[in-house]
Amino acid sequence: MLDKNGIEIRTGQVVKVSGAFFQNDNGLYYVEHSPGDPTWSGHDYCLKKVCKDGRLSKSTRNICFWPIGAFTNDRVKNAKANAWNREHSEIEVVTISDMSWILGRFREKLEQTAKDVQRHTWDFGEDDTMVQKEKAIQSHYEGVIRFIEGKEF
């Protein structure tokens, strides 16, 4: 999927959501999962809210999905919000000065996946489907880290 400027949205990027029906949905997020990621079965983007300095927001409502969906206990309000979001909300890939926290988050995921690969290899052998799946996830996280570091375009 492309942002409002025609830039492809990828895992690890920082995006700015604006024009959403609910004010809390507007803000800066990093893309934690994208469609096609080996760790994600959704067809949407999973976004985690970040502060301007790149740290994860401590807000209780710090998760958003793109395209934005409204889920309240009022059917009419949901319909109104979803129609508004389809028409008015926008997403834009932005840069922030400090990506170290986000980079650290993906390095932690890579480290855990490497441990899983090692453990599953010991338990089941190199050719096991679980080992192959974990290696694909490991490769994915390596690619995200290279992308964030600017070594892959």
Image: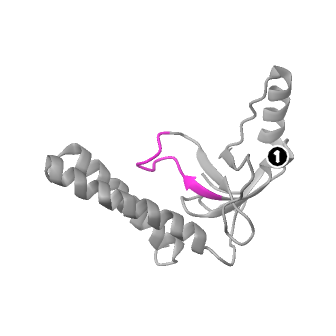
Q: Residue at 47% of width from left, 45% of height from top?
A: 40
Dominant SS in magenta: loop
Q: What is the x, y in percent for residue 105? A: 52, 64
Q: Residue at 54% of width from left, 40% of height from top?
A: 43
Q: What is the x, y in percent for residue 98? A: 65, 77
> Looking at this view, is 57 or 79 the one in front?
57
Circle 1 residue = 20
For mark 1, give the secondary structure: loop
Q: Quadrant of residue 110?
A: bottom left
Q: Amino acid at mark 1?
A: Ala
Q: Residue at 68% of width from left, 72% of height from top?
A: 95
Q: Residue at 56% of width from left, 55% of height from top?
A: 32
Is residue 32 left or right of 53 when viewed as pictured? left
Q: Which residues are magenta?
A: 30-41
Q: What is the x, y in percent for residue 53? A: 71, 72
> Looking at this view, is 141 or 17 the one in front?
141
Residue 12 vs 128, above or below: the answer is below
Q: What is the x, y in percent for residue 73? A: 79, 23
Residue 31 on the magenta span: yes
Residue 63 on the magenta span: no
